[in-house]
Image (cartoon, grey):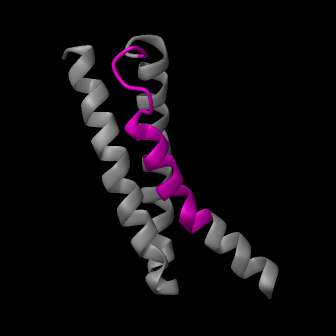
Amino acid sequence: MKLGLIYKICGYSSIVLGIIAAISIYKIQYIKIGLPICVLGFITAGINIFLNTKYFYDEEKIPKGYLGMFLSSIPVLFILFVIYKH
């Protein structure tokens, strides 16, 4: 596979996985499904950010991995908030 294709796939998949993970806080029962998806979102976002830093820095100012990482962190922050509140 070409490096550019891996970069694009990781970027878009991190956003999609982040959206699915962020939707999982809609009901507390979905958190069990959302956390593994959140981990996958972190991994793909990390790969995207790494590839941007190493190879594609001139093409994009802000890689899609940052948005995916933000969306993937929402369930983790929600759990911390719920634990702290109780």
Q: 32 and 74: which one is in front?
A: 74
Give the answer, above or below, for where 56 lies relative to 29.
above
Q: Residue at 35% x, 50% y: name it.
A: 15
Q: Residue at 49% x, 77% y: name it.
A: 25
Asked which quadrant contains residue 4, the reply is: top left
The picture places residue 31, in percent across and down from the top left corner, at 50, 75
Q: Residue at 45% x, 83% y: name it.
A: 26
Q: Residue at 46% x, 87% y: name it.
A: 27
Main SS, magenta region, reads helix
Q: 61 and 11: which one is in front?
A: 61
Q: Where, quadrant-wise, is the C terminus in this rendering?
A: bottom right
Give the answer, above or below, for where 4 lies relative to 33.
above
The picture places residue 17, in percent across and down from the top left corner, at 36, 55
The picture places residue 72, in percent across and down from the top left corner, at 49, 56
Q: Where, quadrant-wise, is the N terminus in this rendering?
A: top left
Magenta stretch in the rendered image: 57-76
Q: How many marks?
A: 0
Give the answer, above or below, for where 17 lies relative to 85.
above
Asked if residue 74 lies in the magenta stretch, the reply is yes
Give the answer, above or below, for where 63 lies relative to 82.
above
The picture places residue 12, in percent across and down from the top left corner, at 28, 43
Asked which quadrant contains residue 60, the reply is: top left
Instruction: Name the side, left or right, on which 42 lies relative to 15.
Output: right
Instruction: Name the side, left or right, on which 1 lies relative to 46.
Output: left
